Amino acid sequence: MSKILLLGDRSEVLYHNMDEMKPLINVLKEHYEVVVSEDYPEITKNSLVGIDLILNYIDNWQNRGNEKVEGVLCDYLLEGGRILTVHSGILITSASKLLALHGASFNGHEDYDLLTFKRLGDSHYITKDMNSFSIYDEPYEFEFMSDRKVDIIMEFEFKGKTYPAGWTVEEGAGKLAYLAFGHDSKTFAQKPVQEIIKRSIDWLLQ
């Protein structure tokens, strides 16, 4: 059984408590071994031995992250690791090297609202045959880096416009995927969200 390390914040939260993921964690535990930790400031290369995938839901990097941890996570990915970053996990502005591996940076969001998510094309494993679905969440916006190659696989509609909502990146020997939804437990309780996250994990672990 593949081993997933979920990283997030519980005791020092800014916006997104990792406990909001409980509906998702309960589903994932049926398929994977899931270890939940908020101790990412102490991560070392040795502590990631045996971890098949990191599920990044970090919320408070600006106060708890550091260059040493950033280096460990970058090396993990480039040396063949797998990272799935969800929602606030991309709020790592001070971690420029790790952010670059995501291929885009967070550029703000409007108020929590009803968003409709759609697949882009039908060729990617994660979104193949995915039906459009609508959920309430934060409409994250991003600025993509011109020198990074990303494969955008999903978008959301909001106020008559479309925005990227999910993409994949292959860097070094590793793979990374990003999904923009994930504000609270209401999102993580939705079956389409759970399915997209599981398929993202399965694609990353291939």
Image (cartoon, rainbow, N blue to C red):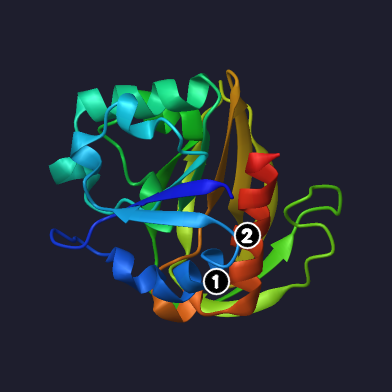
Q: Up-down: is 20 above or below 201?
A: below
- In the image, what residue occupies the spot 31% across and 32% down? 47
Q: Is residue 44 visible?
A: yes
Q: Up-down: is 190 above or below 169?
A: below
Q: Up-down: is 3 above or below 14?
A: above
Q: Earlier in the sequence, mark 2 or mark 1?
A: 1
Residue occupied by mark 1: 27
Please identify, in this view, whether the residue under mark 2 or under mark 1 is nearer the observer.
1
Local packing at callout 1 (Cα closer than 10 Å; few below 14, some 14-19, many 20+) is: some
**Tag 2 near tag 1, CB within 8 Å:** yes
* Outermost residue to the front: 1
Q: Quadrant of residue 133?
A: bottom right
Report the amino acid beneath label 1.
Val
Q: CA distance from mark 2 to mark 1?
A: 9 Å
Which residue occupies the foreground of this view, 144 or 152?
152
Q: Name the spot of residue 20 as percent of width and height, x first.
A: 35, 72
Q: Name the spot of residue 124 as percent of width and height, x first.
A: 79, 47
Question: Tag 2's secondary structure?
Answer: helix
- In the image, what residue occupies the spot 13% across and 58% down? 12
Which residue occupies the foreground of this view, 183 or 4?
4
Q: Name the spot of residue 147 as percent of width and height, x first.
A: 56, 20
- In the image, what residue occupies the spot 52% across and 39% down? 52
Q: Quadrant of the C terminus?
A: top right
Indicate left or right for 97 with 28 as reference. Answer: left
Indicate left or right for 160 with 86 as reference. Answer: right
Residue occupied by mark 2: 198
Q: Quadrant of residue 194?
A: bottom right
Local packing at callout 2 (Cα closer than 10 Å; few below 14, some 14-19, many 20+) is: some
Q: Name the spot of residue 9 as percent of width and height, x first.
A: 24, 57
Q: Is residue 96 visible?
A: no
Report the amino acid beneath label 2.
Lys
